[in-house]
Image: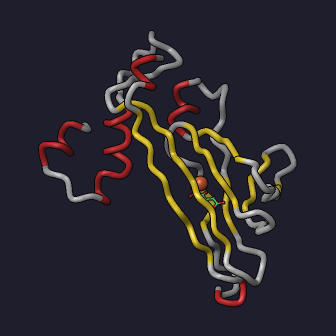
Amino acid sequence: MDSFTKRPIIMMKMIRYPPLSATLPGQFGVGAHSDFGGVTVLLQQPGREGLEVWHDESEAWLPVPAVQDVLVISCGDMIQKWSGGVYRSARHRVINKSDAERFSCATFWHGDFSATNPLNPNDPNKDTVGQLLLRRFGNQFSLSKEVMAAAN
Ligand SMILES: O=C(O)CCC(=O)C(=O)O
Ligand SMILES: [Fe+2]
Protein backbone atom coordinates (compact mmCIF):
# COMPACT_ATOMS: atom_id res chain seq x y z
CA MET A 1 0.00 0.00 0.00
CA ASP A 2 3.00 2.32 0.70
CA SER A 3 4.00 2.27 -2.94
CA PHE A 4 0.52 3.55 -3.73
CA THR A 5 0.38 6.49 -1.36
CA LYS A 6 3.88 8.04 -1.19
CA ARG A 7 3.65 10.46 -4.11
CA PRO A 8 0.15 10.06 -5.49
CA ILE A 9 -0.95 11.67 -8.73
CA ILE A 10 -3.78 14.02 -7.76
CA MET A 11 -5.79 16.06 -10.22
CA MET A 12 -8.15 18.78 -9.12
CA LYS A 13 -10.89 20.17 -11.34
CA MET A 14 -12.95 23.27 -10.60
CA ILE A 15 -16.20 23.10 -12.55
CA ARG A 16 -18.71 25.82 -13.41
CA TYR A 17 -22.13 24.83 -14.72
CA PRO A 18 -24.16 27.56 -16.42
CA PRO A 19 -27.70 28.27 -15.18
CA LEU A 20 -30.48 26.04 -16.51
CA SER A 21 -31.81 28.87 -18.70
CA ALA A 22 -28.47 29.03 -20.53
CA THR A 23 -28.50 25.36 -21.55
CA LEU A 24 -30.22 23.70 -24.49
CA PRO A 25 -33.10 21.28 -23.85
CA GLY A 26 -31.66 17.87 -22.99
CA GLN A 27 -28.14 19.26 -22.53
CA PHE A 28 -26.19 17.85 -19.58
CA GLY A 29 -23.62 19.60 -17.44
CA VAL A 30 -21.66 16.34 -17.47
CA GLY A 31 -22.96 13.33 -19.38
CA ALA A 32 -23.25 9.89 -17.79
CA HIS A 33 -19.84 8.42 -16.95
CA SER A 34 -17.89 6.62 -14.28
CA ASP A 35 -14.70 8.20 -13.01
CA PHE A 36 -11.59 6.65 -14.42
CA GLY A 37 -9.19 6.28 -11.57
CA GLY A 38 -8.75 5.77 -7.85
CA VAL A 39 -10.72 7.73 -5.27
CA THR A 40 -12.75 10.83 -6.15
CA VAL A 41 -13.44 13.48 -3.51
CA LEU A 42 -16.16 15.88 -4.61
CA LEU A 43 -17.19 19.17 -3.02
CA GLN A 44 -20.55 20.47 -4.29
CA GLN A 45 -21.84 24.00 -3.85
CA PRO A 46 -24.42 23.78 -1.03
CA GLY A 47 -28.00 23.83 -2.28
CA ARG A 48 -27.05 23.57 -5.96
CA GLU A 49 -28.46 20.15 -6.73
CA GLY A 50 -27.52 18.44 -9.95
CA LEU A 51 -25.44 15.33 -9.34
CA GLU A 52 -27.25 12.04 -9.96
CA VAL A 53 -26.03 8.46 -9.48
CA TRP A 54 -27.37 5.47 -11.39
CA HIS A 55 -28.86 2.84 -9.09
CA ASP A 56 -28.88 -0.55 -10.84
CA GLU A 57 -31.43 -2.26 -8.61
CA SER A 58 -34.16 0.36 -9.08
CA GLU A 59 -32.94 1.32 -12.57
CA ALA A 60 -33.19 5.00 -11.68
CA TRP A 61 -31.02 8.10 -11.36
CA LEU A 62 -30.85 9.08 -7.67
CA PRO A 63 -30.08 12.68 -6.68
CA VAL A 64 -27.04 13.27 -4.46
CA PRO A 65 -27.93 16.17 -2.15
CA ALA A 66 -25.52 19.12 -2.18
CA VAL A 67 -25.04 19.69 1.54
CA GLN A 68 -22.77 22.20 3.28
CA ASP A 69 -19.45 20.68 4.47
CA VAL A 70 -20.29 17.24 3.06
CA LEU A 71 -17.86 15.60 0.66
CA VAL A 72 -18.97 12.92 -1.77
CA ILE A 73 -16.41 10.10 -1.88
CA SER A 74 -16.54 7.57 -4.67
CA CYS A 75 -14.22 5.20 -6.44
CA GLY A 76 -13.23 4.96 -10.05
CA ASP A 77 -12.78 2.21 -12.62
CA MET A 78 -9.21 1.41 -11.53
CA ILE A 79 -10.40 0.53 -8.02
CA GLN A 80 -13.31 -1.47 -9.42
CA LYS A 81 -10.88 -3.48 -11.51
CA TRP A 82 -8.29 -3.86 -8.74
CA SER A 83 -10.89 -5.03 -6.22
CA GLY A 84 -12.40 -7.55 -8.63
CA GLY A 85 -15.68 -5.62 -8.52
CA VAL A 86 -16.02 -5.57 -4.71
CA TYR A 87 -15.90 -1.74 -4.88
CA ARG A 88 -17.89 -0.40 -7.79
CA SER A 89 -17.37 2.82 -9.72
CA ALA A 90 -20.77 4.47 -9.82
CA ARG A 91 -22.17 5.80 -13.07
CA HIS A 92 -23.14 9.43 -12.56
CA ARG A 93 -24.11 12.60 -14.43
CA VAL A 94 -24.81 16.26 -13.68
CA ILE A 95 -27.77 18.41 -14.70
CA ASN A 96 -27.78 21.83 -13.07
CA LYS A 97 -31.38 22.13 -11.92
CA SER A 98 -31.30 25.68 -10.62
CA ASP A 99 -31.41 28.92 -12.53
CA ALA A 100 -28.10 30.01 -11.08
CA GLU A 101 -24.54 28.94 -11.74
CA ARG A 102 -23.41 25.78 -10.00
CA PHE A 103 -19.82 25.27 -8.88
CA SER A 104 -18.14 22.08 -7.79
CA CYS A 105 -14.61 20.93 -7.13
CA ALA A 106 -13.61 17.35 -7.92
CA THR A 107 -10.31 15.87 -6.75
CA PHE A 108 -9.18 12.66 -8.39
CA TRP A 109 -6.72 10.74 -6.26
CA HIS A 110 -4.98 8.15 -8.42
CA GLY A 111 -2.02 6.77 -6.47
CA ASP A 112 1.69 6.72 -7.32
CA PHE A 113 2.76 6.64 -10.97
CA SER A 114 4.58 3.32 -10.63
CA ALA A 115 2.12 1.58 -8.27
CA THR A 116 0.47 -1.66 -9.36
CA ASN A 117 -2.73 -3.10 -7.84
CA PRO A 118 -2.48 -2.04 -4.17
CA LEU A 119 -5.39 -4.27 -3.14
CA ASN A 120 -3.90 -7.49 -4.46
CA PRO A 121 -0.11 -7.83 -4.75
CA ASN A 122 -0.67 -11.24 -6.43
CA ASP A 123 -2.67 -9.74 -9.28
CA PRO A 124 -1.04 -11.15 -12.44
CA ASN A 125 -1.87 -7.86 -14.19
CA LYS A 126 1.07 -5.54 -13.50
CA ASP A 127 -0.29 -2.40 -15.17
CA THR A 128 0.84 0.68 -13.25
CA VAL A 129 -1.25 3.72 -12.37
CA GLY A 130 0.90 5.73 -14.79
CA GLN A 131 0.37 3.32 -17.67
CA LEU A 132 -3.38 3.24 -17.12
CA LEU A 133 -3.57 7.04 -16.93
CA LEU A 134 -1.47 7.54 -20.04
CA ARG A 135 -3.50 5.02 -22.01
CA ARG A 136 -6.72 6.76 -21.03
CA PHE A 137 -5.71 10.44 -21.10
CA GLY A 138 -2.35 10.50 -22.92
CA ASN A 139 -3.85 11.78 -26.16
CA GLN A 140 -5.11 14.89 -24.34
CA PHE A 141 -1.55 16.04 -23.60
CA SER A 142 1.38 16.81 -25.88
CA LEU A 143 3.57 13.91 -24.79
CA SER A 144 6.56 12.53 -26.66
CA LYS A 145 6.36 9.20 -28.51
CA GLU A 146 8.77 7.74 -25.93
CA VAL A 147 6.48 8.62 -23.01
CA MET A 148 3.43 7.24 -24.82
CA ALA A 149 5.33 4.06 -25.73
CA ALA A 150 6.00 3.49 -22.03
CA ALA A 151 2.27 3.28 -21.46
CA ASN A 152 1.87 0.21 -23.64
O1 LIG B 1 -19.79 18.46 -10.58
C1 LIG B 1 -20.13 17.40 -10.04
O2 LIG B 1 -20.94 17.36 -9.12
C2 LIG B 1 -19.52 16.08 -10.52
C3 LIG B 1 -18.44 16.21 -11.57
C4 LIG B 1 -17.96 14.90 -12.09
O3 LIG B 1 -18.62 13.92 -12.05
C5 LIG B 1 -16.61 14.80 -12.69
O4 LIG B 1 -15.95 15.83 -12.89
O5 LIG B 1 -16.16 13.67 -12.96
FE1 LIG C 1 -17.40 12.16 -12.38
**Image position of 104 (left or right of 128):** right
> Splitting the image into four quadrants, where does ligand 1 fall?
bottom right
Residue found at the far front of this picture: 69
Residue in front for this viewpoint, 10 or 63? 10
Residue found at the far top of this picture: 122
- Quarter of the image holding residue 74? top right
**Image position of 6 (left or right of 89):** left
**Image position of 120 (left or right of 140):** right
Q: How many marks?
A: 0
Seen at 77% across and 75% down, the residue is: 97
Q: Position of residue 43 (x, y in %)?
A: 66, 54
Q: Position of residue 12 (x, y in %)?
A: 48, 53
Query: Coloring scheme of the render?
Result: secondary structure
Residue in front for this viewpoint, 51 or 25? 51
Can residue 61 be seen here? The reply is no
Q: Is residue 93 above or below residue 75?
A: below
Residue found at the far right of this picture: 58
Seen at 62% across and 72% down, the residue is: 29
Q: Position of residue 72 (x, y in %)?
A: 70, 47
Q: Is residue 121 above or below residue 78?
A: above
Can residue 100 be seen here? The reply is yes
Seen at 61% across and 38% down, the residue is: 75
- Quarter of the image holding residue 111? top left
**Image position of 147 (left or right of 8):** left
- Quarter of the image holding residue 5? top left
Seen at 87% across and 49% down, the residue is: 58
Q: Is residue 62 above or below residue 124?
A: below
The C terminus is located in which quarter? Answer: top left
